[in-house]
Amino acid sequence: MDEFILRQEELIDNPTPRVPICLALDVSGSMSGEPLQEMAKGVEMFFDAIKEDEIARYSAEISIVTFGGVARKALDFYSIDRQEVPEFYADGATPMGEAVNLALDMLEHRKEEYKNAGVDYYQPWLVIMTDGEPTDDISNAASRLSELASSKKISIFPIAIGNTNTDKFAKLSPTRPPLRLNGLNFREFFMWLSKSVSRVSQSTPGETVSLDVKGINAWAQI
């Protein structure tokens, strides 16, 4: 069956309000070795935690964009029970602008599918994780994010890995400065993220849900 039709049928069969989340993950050459391995383990834990949450598993929808050499759609939106976390391979430069534009296109497309199916949704989430500076033009991506953030149509989580310079990275998050991951605490970050998704999925779309600020201490350099 065509994937588009199957996704639409899933929305009809399960009209629960959705939390669309896109993970934009740096898989450039500098991420090779332990950083990439730990990030992959963290993503696996994130998916497992969502699956184990009786409410979030029906609300959370996750997609993944990777950027290393090129930006690519590694995983499209789907019921999480039908998804498998892709394998990650490190290579190339850091086309962050291209990746963010692709992620925003995917989020916008999924929102249209929600509207067409009459399914309500929460503010989309975009997580951007990188250990380096963008090697392409980020001006268009930054402009799009600024417009969406100012109208409260997206929540951005910029996560810096290692000692990367965050000056350019900060341009992609006009409302929330980048947080630096404490060492390789990817798993702690993704557990915090899964709990945050769970809290949102138990609220009413449009309702303001405060983030667990104290929990950030477990994974970020404050």
Image (spheres, grey):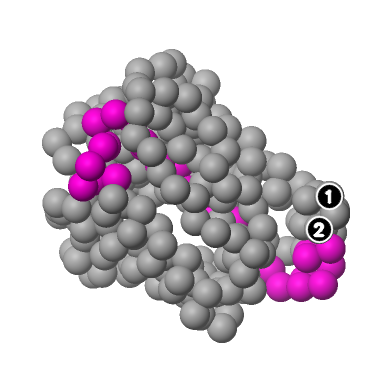
Tell which residue pokes out farthest to the bottom in this image.
54
Q: Is residue 128 left or right of residue 86?
A: left
Helix, strand or loop at label 1? It is: loop
As rendered, which of 66 and 120 lies closer to the eye? Answer: 66
The magenta segment: 9-36
**Residue at image x 63%, y 48%?**
76
Residue 177 visible at all: no
**Residue at image x 18%, y 64%?**
217
* Relative image position of residue 116 (x, y in whole percent): 85, 53
**Residue at image x 78%, y 51%?**
3
**Residue at image x 44%, y 48%?**
87
Residue type indicated by callout 1: Asp
Which residue is the site of mark 1?
Answer: 2
Image quarter hosting the C terminus: bottom left
Image quarter hosting the N terminus: bottom right
> How many circles with numbers are drawn on the protein?
2
- State the separation of the CA atoms marked 1 and 2: 6 Å
- Which image quadrant for residue 88? top left
* Relative image position of residue 17 (x, y in whole percent): 68, 68
Q: Is residue 147 above or below residue 51?
A: above
As rendered, which of 41 and 108 lies closer to the eye? Answer: 41
Helix, strand or loop at label 2? It is: helix
As rendered, which of 152 and 73 lies closer to the eye? Answer: 73
**Local crowd size for mark 1, using a 10 Å CA cut-off: few (<14), some (14–19), many (≥20):** few
Asked whether the residues under the numbered discs 1 and 2 touch, taking CB atoms below 8 Å apart as contact, a structural biologist would say yes
- Which image quadrant for residue 215? bottom left
Residue type indicated by callout 2: Leu
19 magenta-colored: yes
Which residue is the site of mark 2?
Answer: 6
* Relative image position of residue 130 (x, y in whole percent): 31, 37
